[in-house]
Amino acid sequence: MHPLLRDHWLVVPLFAIGIFATGFHAIPILTALYPALLLHYSRKQWRNVLFAYVIASLSTTLAIMGMFDGDAEAPSFQHPGTVFGLSLFGNVVVLWCLAVDHFMQHTCIWQRILVFPCLWAGSWLLFTALAPFGDIYVYSNPVLGWSDLVQAAATIGGRPMIDFVLALGSTILLELKHSWEAPVFLRDEEDAGEPISNPIHFWKSPTPLYAIFIGILLFYGGIQTSIYPGSFFQVGYPDYVPETVPVGCVVGPGNINQELQLQHEHWFNKTTKLAEAGAKMILWSEETAQVHDPDEEASLLQRGKDIAKEQSVYIALTYDLLGPIQQNKLVLITPKGDIGIDYIKAHPVPFVEPQPAGPNVLPFVDTPEFGRVGAAICFDFNFPSFMLQSSKNKIDLMLQASWTWGPIGTYHSQGNALRAVENGFTMLRCGSQGLSGVFEPVANGLFTQHLPSVNDNDYIFNLPLRKRRWTLYGFIGDAFGYVCLGLGVAAAGYRLYKIIQERRSSNIEI
């Protein structure tokens, strides 16, 4: 075989698989295998690390090409240059992790296996915390439907633990090549002469340990997803199923139809219709209405207060305030006509929302019917550190008003739903061109209800009335991810130190 073909035959498969391992049409099994393929290719030689970065960036560009297709009248793929720039920027995490992994290849087996997953989990967390894009770009988005694994990992260590588990599976998979080269499965060289039946090898081999680790996670996740509080053992439904109440969702146009946003009475008519149908909480999707100034805002809020008192319901109004300072707002009105929450979006979408960010404080209000209720808007849910305030404040129910565009609706909704699992709250989501419904602190739980919702519609869901679930992640926050990052960097630093010491020793001998 020609050396060039031997060294780079993976380029085309990596590019093709990458399109369906990330982005809006990702296939979860490819998402799980993709880091292993990148590692296998990048470990061959240093220049392959850079090639892998370029390949990943090109693949991701095609996978998310419609990310900024906000103009419904224009053709698809409206901002390819911006998407390519985003891909290059996001895949710096991939470049960094592959480079350190290549640097660590001539170390012991445990460093080869553990450094990459630690850096992968910790670096994506750092990217999420520092970059203005939150976690919308993180590679693990497509696997969030694997309920038992996601349930366990997210409630223990949040998304970083999901990333760690997937990356660890990749390095374990690559160590299988040693089974083709040595008579003993995954042993260090110093153990090569010992019999395979020696039980020491079992505990020194990463594959069975990884299998045990995954088994424990799946067992723990299975308990959470299969056994509801109060349901054990074979308890009848009436004895543990909580009361549910109807809640409503009014889906507006978002910021793509300003003429429709100005038809306030149209949206209040839908709100009244839902209240008369029995809804006790009614949430508008993001930017359903628009007001030009504080006087128009006061009129909008007064109309909402009148309906809330008349129908004895909670109404969460969402609207754009254009002046004197543009704001993307959510205001929750109580059945008494009081304002319980007055919130400005804390994380505007880069390149899409030019308005200034609101305070980085998650609002909440105590209610007799729903417990402690919090609220945030769309992209706010892509920032785990921001949403951790829901655990600190023991919020039972989170309201999420959202608006998405182009092809990103389902992808974005599924990533946002992870916040409910991590922090143990129930989420009522009302989204324009995305998923709307009830999302539980249990992945694919009994009361999870959602459907794809399009503009100018209204829906009713049944919300369970219950307190939040305690989660370890809600208690320790992102500590797992930052510990992983610290360990990965420390291992790489120690490796660099040893190399420098060895070279100094060689120079002294000479």
Image: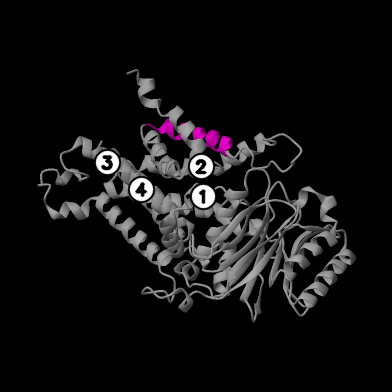
Which residue has dot 4 on it?
Answer: 169
Look at label 2 and name its amino acid. Ala
Magenta range is 45-63
Quarter of the image where the C terminus is located: top left
Give neighbour class at mark 4: few <14, some 14-19, many 20+ (Cα, 10 Å).
Answer: many
Which residue has dot 1 on it?
Answer: 141
- Distance from disc 2 to disc 3, alpha carbons, whole Å, reads 26 Å
Q: Decide: marks 2, 3 in contact (CB < 8 A)?
A: no
At x 72%, y 48%, the residue is 352
The prevailing secondary structure element of the residues shown in magenta is helix
Look at label 3 and name its amino acid. Leu
Give neighbour class at mark 3: few <14, some 14-19, many 20+ (Cα, 10 Å).
Answer: some
For marks 3 and 1 on the same chain, the one whose residue lies earlier in the sequence: 1
Look at label 4 and name its amino acid. Gly
Q: Position of residue 175 (x, y in %)?
A: 29, 42
Quarter of the image where the N terminus is located: top left
Q: Position of residue 159 (x, y in %)?
A: 48, 57
Look at label 1 and name its amino acid. Asn
The label shown at residue 176 is 3
Q: How many marks?
A: 4
Q: Decide: marks 3, 1 in contact (CB < 8 A)?
A: no
Which residue has dot 2 on it?
Answer: 26
At x 50%, y 51%, the residue is 124
